[in-house]
Image: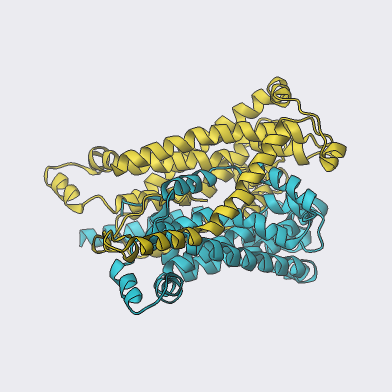
Chain colours: A cyan, B yellow
Amino acid sequence: MKSRARARSYTVVGIVLTALMLFPVYWMLNVSLTPQQDMRRNPPDLLPLHPTFEGYRAVLDDQLPYLGTSLLIGLGTVALTLVLAAPAGYSLAKLRPRGAGAIGLALLIAQMIPGIVMAMGFYGIFLDLGLLNSWWGLVIADSTIAVPFGVMIFAAFMSGIPGELIAASRIDGAGTFRTFWSVVLPVSRNALVTVSLFSFLWAWSDFVFANTLDGGGDLRPITLGIYKYIGNNNQEWNAIMATAVVASVPAAVLLVLAQRYVAAGVTAGAVKDQS
Amino acid sequence: MTIARVDRPRRAPTAAGRGGADAPSLPRRYRRRSRLTALAFVTPLLAYLAAFYLYPLYRNLDLSLRDYTVRSFVAGDAPFTGWDNVQKVLDDPTFGPAMRHTMVFTFVSIAFQYAIGLALAVFFNRHFRLSTVLRALFLIPWLLPLIVSASTWSWMFNSESGVVNYFLHFFGADPVGWLTSPDWALTSVIVANIWIGIPFNLVILYSGLQNIPAELYEAAALDGAGAWQQFRRITFPLLRPVSAITLLLGLVYTLKVFDLIWIMTKGGPGDASSTLATWSYQLGFGTLLPKFGPGAAVGNILILIALVFGLAYIRVQRRQET
């Protein structure tokens, strides 16, 4: 009996801690529903007692093109990342080309390079090539965040595929590419999901590359949409926060749909050999 | 956001040595062909790394060694000046504060993220109703786009109408100009950054705790060890390898933080919250008269610091494997 009461008190403490942690998220929702005239009220309304959707109407009016661009850039980044990372991961895990260790080390170091440094380098290159302010230039830049991570997740996952499976496909007469396409990829679904989700989320959230390389383009992502809001009309916080809520939807979807992939994918990379 | 590594893939025991491609008994012609196939699968990646990692890095290095102006940036004929930009940056009055802020930002953030993350990991390691759901909810701050977190915290820290000052008022304290006063700007961005970093520490440390055998705790409890004793004598020592990895990853990651500070304070007021990352961006893109050379030089200093911690991380991880 005593231990059950204890477990219940843990649940209560856990709920309180979670509520504290998520207060900023709640506040974002609350502010997004607050009417403009109440925005600077003192004390502020802790609950959205008079909710208004004018903030969300502003999102519909102003931000839809930005959201569309972000979707386009996100999907483009996922495609580019998968095309590059899946075969490379397979090669590093199973085909072991010469220099596999060096490639692994290079990928590891690549993940440590600060985004602003890459942004500055890309700025010069894109200026030369006339790629500034184009959405697919941003796809290339955003993919640099995800490709090294993707290769490593694929390699970690594919090295666990039993050799017998691959050998059997060989005996059936399939070449390496055929084996990769019809045997290895289908069983690597978890890795595919993890890498796709993260590369989408990172491209969707990117601000550094967007602000540097696509500041004046026709097609700008949602992060710049919010940034422009903050800069221009910093009075309409319900519109800003409503946009923030909408921009958070992919994160929420990711959390709900992919909780186990997220945990598995991340820990596979970061504390390999511990699990 | 996390650094993945698999340069030495762990093979499943059943797969060891029996993979189709690396069996030594195959005829030589076949082996050569399979080596070419292995290369073919990895070539796109190599080309990509050369074009979109090495080349931008080279461009950045080149920027830092030449005297670029807007005109010569477009024309591409800037004179080579060697270490001038680096010297200029080191002599700049902003260098000292930016370096100090970078260190304070990084180490204070990490200390709190780690301590809070560890406490939460230990807490969630006791299985209770809803523990899985609540732990999943704790991931939210980490998955939100940084611009979302940064703008939310900006409004919460607003001097006149922010909810943080309202709570302070509730407890009888005077309002603070969180983002507008030079004394508080750095603290504000650190608070927001700690909030964002807690979930990552929680996830990694929690997965480390999962690997500590429950029998150890049972034995310790039989010997009469209390909760604190168990933490000090079992949890903390056995978690040391995972802690080392978490802290080093945190260092590499926190050094790079740019979005958050830029969106909340732009490094200001004055230089009050500028770090190497925001200063580099400020020099290169923040003004009408960009100083690409010095900006790139600051970026290269940042890379050097990140690499020191990064190599330390690789060493620690290697040692744990052997």
Residue that appears at 21% across and 59% down: A2
Residue B186, horizontal then vertical, whole percent: 63, 35
Q: Quadrant of the C terminus of chain B?
A: top left
Residue B274, horizontal then vertical, whole percent: 67, 34
Residue A206, horizontal then vertical, whole percent: 65, 55
Q: Closest to the observer: B318 or A96?
A: A96
Q: In the displayed structure, does residue A22 sit left or right of residue A244?
A: left
Q: Closest to the observer: B199 or B162?
A: B199
Residue that appears at 42% across and 51% down: A98
Q: In the displayed structure, does residue B85 sit left or right of residue B247?
A: right
Asked whether residue A274 is in view, the answer is yes
Residue B270, horizontal then vertical, whole percent: 75, 31
Please identify the quarter of the rendering in which residue B276 is found.
top right
Rendered view: B321 above or below A54: above
Residue that appears at 40% across and 75% down: A183
Residue that appears at 31% across and 51% down: A273
Asked whether residue A48 is in view, the answer is no
Please tell me how many numbered marks the rendered image carries. 0
Please identify the quarter of the rendering in which residue A53 is found.
bottom right
Name the residue at the top extreme: B91
Name the residue at the left extreme: B223
Name the residue at the right extreme: B71
Q: In the displayed structure, does residue B275 sit left or right of residue A133?
A: left
Q: Closest to the observer: B296 or A83?
A: A83
